[in-house]
Amino acid sequence: MKNKVILLTTDSWGHGDEELGKTILESFFSLIKQEEGLPAAVFCVNRGVLALTDMSLASLHLKELQHKGVPVLACKTCVDYYGIADKLEAGEISTMKRFIELSAEYEVMTVG
């Protein structure tokens, strides 16, 4: 995972039952944080920024990734759209320009 940027596009992984999707997403990040080779960054867009709030248990694992030195970034436009700037439990607000820079340097893995 160390040469990858995870692009998180939603707060629930897959189509179908939303609660199941949230559980799967939480499990994914729980396992990722235990890997020896951590991702280069996690960039959250669209509903993915909601995974950085207390509405998502994934935020706990994303916060731990951040403490381990993984940049966890939230699209400013998306944060503003959902009005959650003061509700972020993990991550920091960033720009699409930063994502473009990261995607030029690392392989992008889309989760959502």
Image (tube, rainbow, N blue to C red):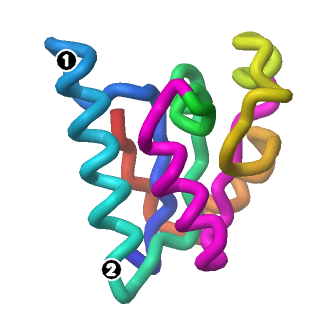
Give the residue pinned by disc 2.
35
The residue at the point 65 percent across, 72 percent down is 67
Of residues 30 and 38, which is closer to you in this image?
Answer: 30
**Relative image position of residue 42 (x, y in whole percent):** 55, 55
Q: Characterize the local packing of mark 1: few (<14), some (14-19) or many (20 or more) Cα atoms within 10 angstroms.
A: few
Q: Characterize the local packing of mark 2: few (<14), some (14-19) or many (20 or more) Cα atoms within 10 angstroms.
A: few
Residue 108 falls in image quadrant: bottom left
Amino acid marked by disc 2:
Glu
Q: Is residue 83 left or right of residue 70?
A: right
**Relative image position of residue 86 (x, y in whole percent):** 84, 28
Residue 103 has which mark?
none
Q: Nearer the viewer, mark 1 or mark 2?
A: 2
Q: Quadrant of the C terminus?
A: top left
Q: Is residue 3 left or right of residue 16?
A: right
Q: Is residue 67 above or below residue 47?
A: below
The verdict on residue 58 being magenta is yes
Q: Which residues are magenta?
A: 55-77
Of residues 12 and 87, which is closer to you in this image?
Answer: 87
Which residue appears farthest toward the bottom when viewing the image? 36
Of residues 97 and 59, which is closer to you in this image?
Answer: 59
The residue at the point 79 percent across, 13 percent down is 83
The verdict on residue 59 being magenta is yes
Mark 1 or mark 2: whose residue is earlier in sequence: 1
Q: Is residue 27 left or right of residue 79?
A: left
Q: Is residue 94 left or right of residue 102?
A: right
Give the residue pinned by disc 1.
15
Q: Quadrant of the N terminus?
A: bottom left
Circle 2: element type: loop
Circle 1: element type: loop
